[in-house]
Image (cartoon, coloured by chain):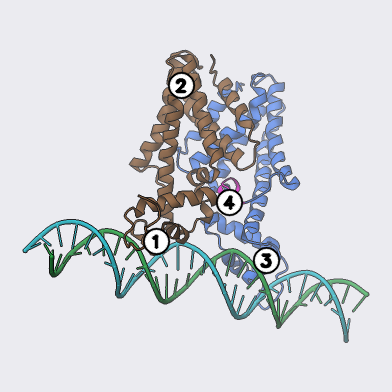
Chain colours: A brown, B blue, C cyan, D green
Amino acid sequence: MSLLKPRGTYHHGNLEEALIGAATQMVRANGAEHLSLRAVAAEVGVSPSAAYHYYPDKDSLIAGVGKELFEHLADMQEAASSKFPGKNVKGARARFRALGMGYFEWAVSEPNLFRLMFGGYCSIDFADAQMKRQETRAWNLLCSCLDDLEKYGAIDPRIRPYGELLAWSTVHGASALIIEGHLPKDSFNAVLDGLELTMGIRQ
Amino acid sequence: MSLLKPRGTYHHGNLEEALIGAATQMVRANGAEHLSLRAVAAEVGVSPSAAYHYYPDKDSLIAGVGKELFEHLADMQEAASSKFPGKNVKGARARFRALGMGYFEWAVSEPNLFRLMFGGYCSIDFADAQMKRQETRAWNLLCSCLDDLEKYGAIDPRIRPYGELLAWSTVHGASALIIEGHLPKDSFNAVLDGLELTMGIRQ
DNA sequence: CAATAATCTGCACATCGTTCAGATATGGAG
DNA sequence: CTCCATATCTGAACGATGTGCAGATTATTG
């Protein structure tokens, strides 16, 4: 199914997903604050009103984009983590680093999408079951990585209970601050180094 | 000078600041994404075009709000820090905690303003000299607090070089994640506890 | 008091989100 | 195959928005 409706036809056939796809690309390029529902509809080859059959308003469309992005982020985290399957200290440490780096690189490479997800642009209910699951997927990756580190004695056990909270907050905060120009890009490596050092993560 | 232009008059007398003031209040209440330049002008008792004498477009007005907010944040950090002037470990530790808590409480009490500052809503050039100074003011508070901790031997010296970066990233990240509903509000205390623990900050 | 500059208004335009009546296609029942 | 209910989409319209411009009003300076 293509995004653009074949001309001469009346039914698109794939509108709901096509709208999300086009909206995602336009947010990616111009930022969520400049997204125009009319432009999205035009891009897909459909009248503006057609969108209202699938999304009650523009905010819902943006929320739809956000939901897909959170799935995508969880997928990426899984991919990053599974690149280092080693069942030993080295593997666990590599996974930790890959999770943090993956998060940051996603943020830096797609700042407009990252802002949409975390900047209050999309009104997603994160208590919602389906949404919770996506967040939990990524969260669990981090937890089990820390569990592994603990199992191998490669993390300070007094610190372990704070692990997920600290790691996510730090990595997220550094990513956000760097994206917005408050910190230089190359500081992220130092952040990861510092995080490993402070959490007592060692070879 | 009041915000509202006295009726029957032609010149406002204080438009530039009045616009910022009204805009700040409206962002505070409804979020930057719903700010209307026309509504701001109306609130101040002036025609929409009048605003264009002081700000070339709506984004610049929002940027003006942002600049003031960064000044305000630095002021608050100074106030929080100066509440604990003790020239000893206890004082330095209290300052560290107060800086983090102040940052978080500001974020939680004014999420819309916090988003405007850090969510990519305002296009501020943080390389700009005046802007740099405000950020540096807050940054220096953190640095000198960490310097004090080091001086009193209350922080792991190996970790010290990462201190500012880690503390700001972590506190900012936790604040942002909590505001957006990704983490529960009460997790911030744990974040601060964990931060002190991992950085080796001790009595 | 006169003239120049600063400040503000009124109107216009294109664009936007959204609504709604009605057009068009699809799929199932007879 | 035909007919009809239903899903899907169009077109025109409304009010609101950001912004530009010509000109009105006030302040300031000589």
Element marked by disc 2: loop
User: Subunit of mark 3?
Assistant: B
How many C-alpha atoms fall within 10 Å of the one at disc 2: few (<14), some, or many (≥20)?
some
Q: Residue A72: x percent and y percent?
A: 43, 38
Q: Chain of mark 2?
A: A
Q: CA distance from mark 3 to mark 4?
A: 19 Å
Q: CA distance from mark 4 to mark 1?
A: 30 Å
- Pointer 2 with pointer 3, Cβ within 8 A: no
User: On the rendered structure, is C21 left or right of B161?
Assistant: left
Q: Which residue is mark 2?
A: A84
Q: Mark 2 or 3, which is nearer the eye?
A: 2
Q: Is residue B119 magenta?
A: yes
Task: Say whether mark 1 and mark 4 are on the same chain.
Answer: no
On the image, numbered disc 1 is attached to which residue?
Answer: A46
The image quarter in which residue B92 lies: top right
Q: Are marks 3 and 4 in contact (CB under 8 Å)?
A: no
Left or right: A65 as drawn, with respect to A9: right
Residue in the picture at 40% in, 44% down: A67
| Residue under pointer 3 | B52
Real-space CA distance between mark 2 and mark 1, rounded to the nearest whole angstrom: 45 Å
Residues at marks 2 and 3 on the same chain: no
